[in-house]
Every structure is written in structure tokens, then in C-alpha cells.
Image (cartoon, rainbow, N blue to C red):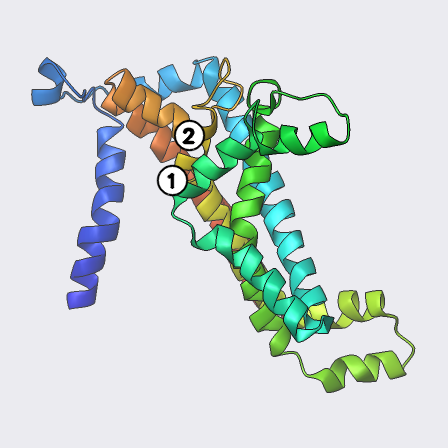
Amino acid sequence: MPALILIGIFLAGPILWSFYGSFTNAALTGANAKNPEWIGFENYVNLFTDPLFPQSLLLTVIFVLVSAVIGQNFLGLGLALLMRRAHRVVAAVVGVCVVAAWVLPEIVAAFVAYAFFFRDGTLNQLTGLVGLPGVDWLFEHPMLAIILANIWRGTAFSMMVYQAALGDVPREVTEAAEIDGAGSAQSLVFVTLPMIRRSIATNLMLITLQTLAVFTLIYVMTAGGPTNRSTTLPIMAYEEAFRYSDIGYGTAIAVVLLIIGAAFSLAYIRLLRERKP
């Protein structure tokens, strides 16, 4: 019973309030801040006719798919596989370098990424050494910069999940596959990956939900710009709620983000289910 009460207060309560707030004209200041009124689906009608919404929705999906599902997931799996066969010292050094980005506070990691991709930053200093012209990454390619930054920051989590999963795969099984003539790639695809399927689905669900909520990294690097070219849904919700003081409208965006996260979660939970013979 105490657990149910805590879940109700700290988990279900804020979600239910978000749904309620999205149907009101609540504001940060003014008369609507003191006495918000029920306005039905007006916030959702305005949202689905807002020209910025489809662009932000598309950028959010691209950000999640490319940086988390593809980038962090595959790079983390690749590093975990390579570190199983690497020398202990090499594996330890690589592990420390990868995990260092993950343990940094998000605001610190965001400033590090900003300094790396800035016009006069580290990346352009390095490319300048080999004679390549400097690129204003944060202005010309803002989505590419924040996608690479999120891959850099989040790959360590996937790597550790897959290291633990691969450690539970019996060596006898992979060795038996190799004796039967399976190559390394065939052994990986047809033996190892099916055995760690649950870890793959769990990792995908966690990194997807983490990436959907990324705000500080994007806001510090580009603030959603230039001209909204990196405005994902969390940035759009923040701008509407706190810059333009429209709490109800910002909450409606947050509810849409919540539904997207739930859809991804249901897909991964379905993947986690054991297939009946």
C-alpha cells in the first residue's frame, strides 16, 4: 500500500496534472495564472495547426532514431564486442574514456560539446591542422552537431548494458557454433544476438526515453536555432510554457511527447515478450 501511494504521488500525479493542464488556459503570469479556465481541446487544435509542430515532431523522431536507436545502440554494442577481445589494459582505457562522458553532469557535458563544435572550437582547430576549412557546425549543421554530441554522451550506457549481457552468453555455445562452421558474423547474428534479445530491447527502451527527454544538451548548444532548425519537442514546450508564459499550450506539447514515449515503450515491451513455439 505505501508503494502504491508513493507511485500515485510522484508518478501518476504529475502525469494526470499534465493531462488536466493541457485542457486549460493556464499561464505563467496574469489573470490566467491565478484562475485558469477549462478550454477543452483548444490547445491541441492550435498545436496541430501550428506550422512549427510538424517540423519539431520530425526533428524529435530523427534525433531519437539517429542518435539513440542507431548511434548509441550500435556503437555501444560494437564497443562491448571489441572490448571482449581487447587486451585488458586497452579495454580499461577505452572504457574509462567512454564512461567519462556519461558520468559528467549534463550541463558540463553540454558546455564541452558546445566548445567542441563552436566556430572557433576544438573540432575546427583539429581540421585546420590538416588544411580543411572551418565549419560553423552549430549554425550550418545544428542537428548533426547535437546528434553527435548525444551519441558521445550516451554510448557508455549501451556499452555497459551489452558488456553485462555478453558476459552471460556461455562461451561453449559460441565455440560450438564456430566448430559447426559458423563465421564470426554468423555466430553474432544467429547465436549471440538472439540470446541477448531481452537486453537489446531493454537498452533500446531506456535510451529512447532518455533521448526523448534531452533538453539541456540542445538548449546549451543551439537553443533550438538557428530559425528553429534544432527545435525538438522539449525545446518547443519550454519556449511556449516559460518564454511565452502559455503553460496550458506547453503542457499539451508535453502530453504529445508523453504519448510518443509510451508508443515506443509498448513497441519495445512487445519485443520483450517471449515468442511461443
Q: What percent of the width, then of the height, locates residue 148?
A: 60, 38
**Disc 1 packing (10 Å; few <14; some 14–19; many ≥20):** some
Residue displayed at 20% across by 63% down: 4
Going by the picture, which residue comes out furthest to the front?
129
Q: Is residue 157 left or right of residue 15?
A: right
**SS at circle 1:** helix
Q: What percent of the width, then of the height, locates residue 71?
A: 63, 46
Labels 1 & 2 near each other (Cβ < 8 A): yes
Decide which of 234, 13 is in the foreground and name it.
234
Q: Quadrant of residue 106?
A: top left
Q: Is residue 145 left or right of residue 218?
A: right
- The numbered mark at residue 107 is 1
Q: Earlier in the sequence, mark 1 or mark 2?
A: 1
Going by the picture, which residue comes out furthest to the right?
181
Q: What percent of the width, then of the height, locates residue 277?
A: 67, 74
Amino acid on which the number 1 mark rests in the picture: Ile
Q: Is residue 16 above or below residue 73?
A: above
Q: Is residue 88 above or below residue 28?
A: below
Amino acid on which the number 2 mark rests in the picture: Val
Q: Is residue 164 left or right of residue 11?
A: right
Q: Is residue 47 above or below residue 272?
A: above
**SS at circle 2:** helix
Decide which of 158, 202 is in the foreground and name it.
158
Q: What percent of the width, then of the height, locates residue 130?
A: 77, 31
- The numbered mark at residue 169 is none
Q: Which residue is mark 2?
A: 220
Residue displayed at 58% across by 63% down: 95
Residue displayed at 66% across by 73% down: 195
Examine the rendering and report whether any part of residue 115 can be seen. yes
Examine the rendering and report whether any part of residue 266 can be seen. no
How many labels sit on residues?
2
